[in-house]
Amino acid sequence: MRVRFSGLAFGGEAVGRADDGRVVFTAYAAPGDLAEVRVIEERPRWVRAELVRVIESGPARIAPPCPWFGACGGCQWQHVSYQEQLAAKQAVVERALGRPVDPIVPSPQPYEYRWRARLHVKAGAVGYRRWRSHEVVDVGRCLLVDPRLDAAIQGARGALPAQGELSAQLGANGQVALRCGRFRAGPDAVDLAAAGEPPFWVAAGEFAQPGADGNRALRELVRAGAQARGLRVLELYAGAGNFTRDLAADASALTAVEGAAAAVALLRRNLPTVPVEHAPVLRAVRVRARRGERWDVVVLDPPREGAREVCAQVGELGAARVVYVSCDPMTLARDLRTLEAAGYVLVRATPVDLMPQTFHVETVAVLTRAASG
């Protein structure tokens, strides 16, 4: 069929409509394109198709700089102008939340921004999986990765096992930690701290935001949203302490809760004076609610699946302010409804583009308790 595409969807595909009104999702098409596509999956209300050829290029289409783009599934939008990518992410968040949000914070560096990478190794290939496939595409140079990190990855090829997952983390001083099964290279952890900051240690394979510039913007939004100066703060899903370091500098008292043992070890190394609770987050919140604990601010940065049950309990802690950091607009929208049912009002939501050339978007949402009566 022939389809005129009108936008981009969360998940990476372009969106158009078939003649019968069904929505058509197609990878590697661009907004404005008129394209010939081949149907590969059908449902009553939508169709998934693969791109056969572009008949007319839309104004958003550009030439992708990476020679592996279209085979490698590591990124989805190199063929789309950066301004169109930003507009698409803004629209995705607004559709999910059902309301206007703040203008998206762009990345100052649309390429070579990644200080963290996770690649697949299989039968000599080192790279990323093909789109909707388990096949590993061998990538000789990833344009999203900082050149220092990429050089370490390429230099390790001969020492890697035949199969596995390669985790790579760059530090602020240029050190690189690599992990792939029993293969180890570099230090146990690298320091991500900017000049003038205390050390902030992260290990390869443990969670960290993808790049330094985007994370700086994210930290600023969380700190401004929390308004924690002189207040009691409960941080949930604290990880290695990315936001904890700023919250601890402002709060009169802070407790950080994290369920992963490796992250807890890093958090305690990074912030040895901060009280850290190693426990499942939902259990920790329920225990505090039963004890009648009261907190002024709750900050949470849950995984992609969100934190619906946790959000249902947050109101029991008495917090006047909640800051929710999300990497999935759909689970964020669901959890915001839960918080609103618990008596909170969304006062602002700010999308942040941490990962240009991909569909991923981060959002910082700030809520306050609704006035009673």
Image (cartoon, rainbow, N blue to C red):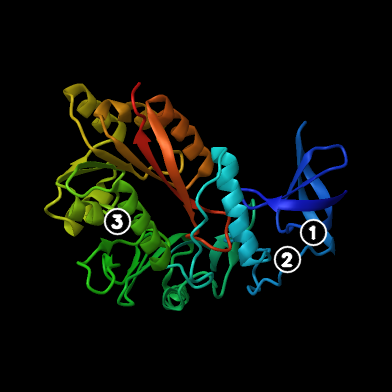
Q: Quadrant of residue 66?
A: bottom right
Whether pointer 2 and pointer 1 mark residues with C-beta atoms closer than 8 Å, the reply is: yes
Q: Which residue is mark 2?
A: 61
Residue 242 picture location, percent across and down:
29, 56
Earlier sequence position, callout 2 versus callout 1: 1
Earlier sequence position, callout 3 versus callout 1: 1
Earlier sequence position, callout 2 versus callout 3: 2
Q: 25 or 299: nearer the eye?
A: 299
Q: Vertically, is 96 above or below 62? A: above
Q: Dot 3: what SS?
A: loop
Q: Quadrant of the C terminus?
A: top left
Q: Which residue is mark 3?
A: 242
Residue at image position (26%, 40%) is 297
Q: Dot 2: what SS?
A: loop
Q: Neighbour class for label 2 at 10 Å: few (<14), some, many (≥20)?
A: some
**Residue 260 seen in the figure:** yes
Residue at image position (62%, 54%) is 88
